[in-house]
Amino acid sequence: MKFEGKILLVDDEAHVRKYVGLITRTLGSPTVVEASNGQEALEVYKREKPDLVLLDVNMPILDGIGTLRELKKIDPDAVVIMLTSLANRQTVEESLELGASNYIRKDTPKDEIALRLRETIEAIFGSEESVPASP
């Protein structure tokens, strides 16, 4: 599988965006756009129409749960994977109930993060040679 879509990476910490951005490049040749908080993410989502959103849970201005809720209002088919350093059961369950496709802890080893991303992408977009074909 070679992912060539557009990814919106949302995290308030620049070093985390850089780290996760490097991991996403192991998936193929995605275009990565970034936002540093939930409010900015909503604006970038409307403008860029990404294929996949990697969304931090704990952020200033608008947290990940609130952002997920609003993203699903904008686009009920939005593909969102939650990223967090927290793993409390309530947050995981709420994210999945709101329509998140997966939930990955940031402290997971990078190879496992890449594998979980790849598995989620294949489950949603299929396992064609290149997914998705962005315009």
Image (tube, rainbow, N blue to C red):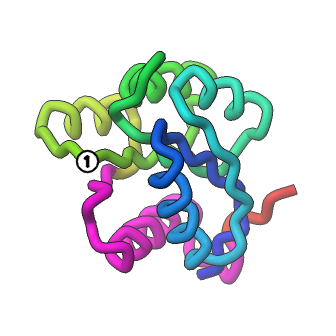
**Residue 121 colored in magenta in the image:** yes
List x then y, in percent, for residue 112. 32, 75
**Amino acid type of disc 1?**
Ser
**Residue 125 colored in magenta in the image:** yes
Q: Quadrant of the C terminus?
A: bottom right
Q: Is residue 2 above or below residue 117?
A: below
Please provide the residue range marked out in magenta. 103-130
Q: Quadrant of the N terminus?
A: bottom right
Residue at disc 1, secondary structure: loop
- Indicate left or right for 1 with 45 as reference: left
Residue shown at 68% from the left, 83% from the top: 129
| Label 1 neighbour load within 10 Å: few <14, some 14-19, many 20+ | few
Residue shown at 29% from the left, 73% from the top: 109
Closest to the observer: 125 or 23? 23
Q: Is residue 130 above or below residue 83?
A: below
List x then y, in percent, for residue 130. 70, 76
- Indicate left or right for 66 with 2 as reference: left
List x then y, in percent, for residue 7. 64, 53
User: Which residue is the site of mark 1?
Assistant: 85
